Amino acid sequence: MFNKTEISEQNNQHEQLKIREKIEIVLRKLQTLKNESSELISQCQELKKLRSEHKGKVCSKCGYAIESGHEITFRDSAGTQTCYYHKECFEQLLIS
Ligand SMILES: [Zn+2]
């Protein structure tokens, strides 16, 4: 027959095992989340890159995207591309 302390020790061991299992499950979930978040971060960076590439082709007057090859590019004195215009929008700017 078990005496009381033996039973409570066994219970303790059982509890500890349960806790360890729970911790392992949580750790595994964390690892999965980590993987997912790093995947999301790289996807975000790709989107940002795409956006910044696309951003360069937006008309500074009307705000709509410009098909590549149809833009009028305005450069500052340093020679870096600063803004783009539709040909029609640029003409309107010249007229106004
Ligand atoms: Zn425009």
Image (cartoon, grey):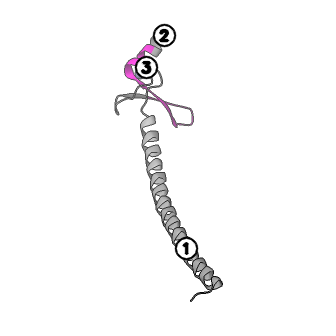
Mark 3 or mark 1: whose residue is earlier in sequence = 1
Q: Residues within 10 Å of mark 1 (few under 14, many from 20)?
A: few
Q: Amino acid at mark 2?
A: Ser
Q: How far apart in space, not on screen, are marks 2 and 3 (Cα)?
A: 10 Å
Residue that carries the numbered disc 3 in the rendered image: 90
Please give the name of the residue rendered at 56% of the width and 89% of the height, measured from the top-left corner. 1
Mark 2 or mark 3: whose residue is earlier in sequence = 3
Looking at the image, the residue that sits furthest to the front is 1
Q: Amino acid at mark 3?
A: Phe
Residue that carries the numbered disc 2 in the rendered image: 96
Q: Amino acid at mark 1?
A: Arg
Please give the name of the residue rendered at 42% of the width and 43% of the height, measured from the top-left corner. 50
Seen from the viewer's position, the closer of residues 88 and 46 is 46
Seen from the viewer's position, the closer of residues 55 and 74 is 55
In the rendering, at what x and y percent does residue 6 appear?
Answer: 62, 85
Q: Residues within 10 Å of mark 3 (few under 14, many from 20)?
A: some
In the rendering, at what x and y percent does residue 40 appear?
Answer: 46, 52
In this rendering, position of residue 69 left or right of residue 90: left
Please give the name of the residue rendered at 45% of the width and 45% of the height, measured from the top-left corner. 49
Residue that carries the numbered disc 1 in the rendered image: 20
